[in-house]
Amino acid sequence: MHGIYAGDIYQLSVRSILPWFWHAEKAMGSMTKAVIGKWNLRWARDERLEAMRARTPPVSGTIEAVRKSSVYTFRKGIGQLADSLATKLKTLSNVKIRQETLVDSIQLLETADAQSMQLVTRSKENARLGTETENFDYVISTISGKALDGIVKPYASLPTLSQTLSVTVMVVNLYFSNPSVLPARGFGYLLPRSLPFEQNPERALGVVFDSDASIGQDEIPGTKVTVMLGGHWWDGWTAYPDEEQGASMAKAILKRHLGIIEEPQAVRVGLQKNCIPQYTVGHHARMAKANNALKKFNGRLRVAGNSYNGVGLNDCVRSAEDVVMGLVQGSKETGLEFFDEKNIPISPYSMDH
């Protein structure tokens, strides 16, 4: 859990982060029986997605290649996906991208014969411009649930979203000119919560051997390594290490764990504040309440993103796809239907088995 959620295993919810295990035990009585019986966790939304894909099959073997991979990236990193989307959207006449703009409030407007969503925005760079009010048919929010609850009127109308807290992670990328600096090959390693403090005083989460994990991405020889620091270890902190301290801690970890004493040719340090939501015990129930609260907006306000049903890129893309499919089909969905009590898995076995 340190690698994906950067979280505390004693606080995270099994039902939310490892749903197969939770549902398998409930359906089959034990995970061992589920494995032996090849129990498969499927949802109604999976069938809807598969039906859509059957109508528009992929034009290449890329999807199958990714399906069989444990990890993947792009030639220029995961950020290439966002950059490519932005480049495409800018070519469309019906799309307007407004940067450096803050949303002060969102509220549902109702008249005798129509409904709309009102957004009040202001420039982040020039406060003298004042606020601007615009009305839209629909709003899809991909910001954090906590941030959304802070701007929806009436304020605090989505209280359970504010209960999803996030952790801060420092990512340190190091490049060594020596292509053989690592004593082992592979994806990397994670540091368990049980590791004694003297073996991890930097409060690191794990180390990724980027040159091995993303073979073929580099244009020059050498070794790339990423060290992840913080996460739940930094809960409650109001100040964080600066770039120099972060680089020093990363090099200390590599020296202690891997025996690397060479100085890197380049180091980049990034602090990602409140970047990974924590699905702690009770997350499913909280999202079920949020789903009911969002229904008051009659499908005009919908949510997607990593605050709800998965923090990874795949999860975010899937949630966005589900929301858009519902919008196109004219349903009054919220984006949180997955948490409805009526939503139960579709499997070869009954829940009484």
Image (spheres, rainbow, N blue to C red):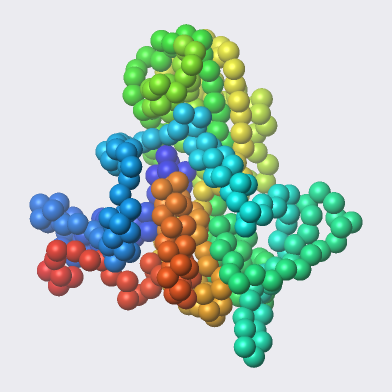
- Spot occupied by residue 164 in the image (x, y as percentages of width and height): 52, 60
Q: Closer to the camera, 122 or 196?
A: 122
Residue at 78 percent across and 59 percent down: it is 122
Q: Tell whether 348 sits left or right of 290.
A: left
Q: Is residue 249 above or below residue 54?
A: above
Q: Closer to the camera, 255 or 100?
A: 100
Residue 147 sits in quarter: bottom right
Q: Closer to the camera, 5 or 321?
A: 321
Residue projecting furthest to the bottom: 112
Q: Tell whether 212 sits left or right of 94.
A: left
Q: Is residue 8 visible?
A: no
Q: Is residue 147 visible?
A: yes
Residue at 43 percent across and 34 percent down: it is 73
Residue at 38 percent across and 35 percent down: it is 72
Residue projecting furthest to the right: 128
Q: Is residue 42 above or below residue 126?
A: below
- Spot occupied by residue 224 in the image (x, y as percentages of width and height): 48, 20
